Image (cartoon, grey):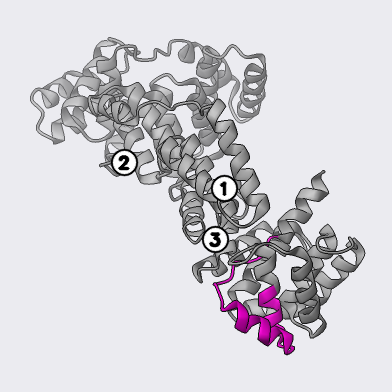
Amino acid sequence: MRAVGFIWVLAVAASLAAADLAALRKQAAAGNAAAQYQLGELFYEAREVERDLDAARRWATQAAEQGHARAQYRLASMQLLGEGGPRDAKAGLELFKKCLPALIQEAEGGEADAQGKLGILFARGVAVKQDADAAAQWFFKAAKQKNIKAQADLASAYLAGQGFEVNPTKAGEWFSRAAEAGYGPAMIHLASLELQGRGRRQNLKAGKQWLMKAAAVKHPGDALRARTLLERLATQAPKLLPDMDALRDRADKGEIDAQMEIARRHETGAGLPMDSFRTVTWYVRAIRQGSPEAAHRLGGMFALGRGVKKNSETAGRFWSLSARLGYPAAQIDWGVMCAKGEGTPRNPAQAYYWFVVARQSVGDPKQIATLDQLQALASTELTPDQVFDIPPIAGKFIAPKGPALRKAMAMAEYGDGAAQFELGQALAEGTGLVKNKTEAFVWFSLAAKQKIKNAAKARDALKLSEKEKAAAQKKIKAFKPMAAPEGG
C-alpha cells in the first residue's frame, strides 16, 4: 500500500500553460520532441483536454526516445505505475537514472519544470539519495517561477515539515496560488485547511466552494475525490473552532487564559495564522501579568530558536522568572541551564537547589526518576556541606500565590520601578515569598534609581553584612530590563 502512494506522487506532472492544441499536435506529429512532451503532459494532467493516459504515454515515449529528459521522467513514472500501458518498475527506475544528469542540468539552468521534477526525486529518494531539504529548495525555486505543481508540492512540504518547519499558514499561501491557477489537488488541500482552520481562520463556506471547484476539473481522479469529500461534508460537518473575535476581546481585557490561547494558536496555526511575532507578543502580555506558563513557553521558543532567533540568555531569563513564579517544568529547565552554564554562568549549587525545589511539586514517577539523576549529577560537583545544606533551604521555597505579587515579580524584571519596590517589600517582610534581605536590597536599589518614593529609605533600613552588600551590588550592576516586541 505504501508503494502505491509512493508511485502515485511521482506520477503527478508539473502544470503547463494552455496551448493551441491543434498547433501543438501538428508540431508533435512532425517529430518536435518539446511539443510531444508538452502534448503528453496536457493529456496526463487533463489541463485544457480530457485525460487520456494512452495518448500521454504514447507522446511521452516518442519524446523520451529523442532524449527529452522531462519526457523520460514522465515515461518512467508511468512505467512504474502501469499507466497507459504495462507496468514495468525495473524499466521505470532505470529510466529515472538515465534522465537524472540532464534533468539536473536543466534544473540548475533555471528550468522550472525540471526543478519541480527533481524536487520529487529528492523527496522520494528515487535515483538519488532521499533529501527533504534539497527537495524543498527545488520546489521553492520552481514555485517562485509560478510552476503550479511545484507550488502545491512546496505547500505540502510546509504542511508536513519536510525541509521546513511545519507551517500550515505558508502551506495555505502556496496552495492558494496553485488552486487559483486551476490545480485540482491544491484546491482540495486548500479546502481542507479552510474547513479545519489550519493556519488560518476557519471558513466553512470557502472550504465548500473550493471543493465544488475541484469537483468540476477535467482530471477524473481529482474530481471524484472532491465530490466524495463534498458528500461527506453534507453529512459530517467539521468541528467548529471557538469564536476568535470573542477570544481576542477577552484577551484584550486582560484574561490570561485567553491571551495564552491566542498565543498558542498563533504558535501552531490552530484557527489563526502562524505568526511568531504575535505569538511572542501575546506570551509577553501574559507574562507581564505574572503567568509562569507563558514565561516557560516563551523561554522554550528562544531556547530552541522556534519562530525566533535562538538566544540561550533570553531563554534563561524567562525560565528563571517562571521558576521563581513556581512552575515545575521551568524549575527543571532552569536548573539544567545552571548545571550546563547555558545562558547563565555555570552554577551546580544553583542547579541542585532548583532540582530539589521542582521535586516538591512533581508527582510523576518518571519525572521523579529524572530529577534523581539530575540531582545526582549536580551533587558530584558540590561539597558535602552543600549537599546537606541546600535541601532545607529549597524546602522553604514559596511560589507567589496572589496575582498582584506574581505581576509585580514579572513587571520588576521589565524594569517597572513601582513593581520593583513592591517586590522588595515582599522579600524584606517575607509576605508571600521567602524572606530574603539581600534580594530585597537589590529590588529596593533598582526602584530607588527610578526615584520611587521610600525605595532608598527601605533599602537603607536593611541591615546587610558587607558580604551580602557586595553580592547585592553585583546583581544590581548586572540587571537589565527584559525587552520583547509589543503589539498584535
| Residue drawn at the location 73% of the way across and 60% of the way down | 11
Q: To which residue does mark 3 refer? A: 151
Q: Is residue 56 above or below residue 249?
A: below
Residue located at (31% from left, 33% from top) = 470
Residue to which mark 1 is pinned: 215
State the residue at coordinates (67%, 24%). Answer: 373
Give the distance between the C-alpha atoms of the residues marked 3 and 2, in whole angstroms: 50 Å
Nearest the eye: 113 or 216: 216
Quadrant in which the C terminus is drawn: top left
On the image, which quarter does residue 24 sit in? bottom right
Query: At which x and y percent is residue 357?
Result: 50, 17
Label 2 belongs to which residue? 478
Res 222 visible: yes
Image location of residue 202, percent across then percent down: 42, 36
* Mark 2 or mark 1, earlier in chain: 1
- Residue 199 in view here: no
Q: Which of marks 1 and 3 is in front?
A: 1
Q: In which quarter of the image is residue 476?
A: top left
N-term mark: 1 or 3: 3
SS class, disc 3: helix
Please give the range of residues in magenta: 12-39
| Disc 2 element | helix
Of circles 2 and 1, the one toward us is 1
Residue type, label 1: Ala
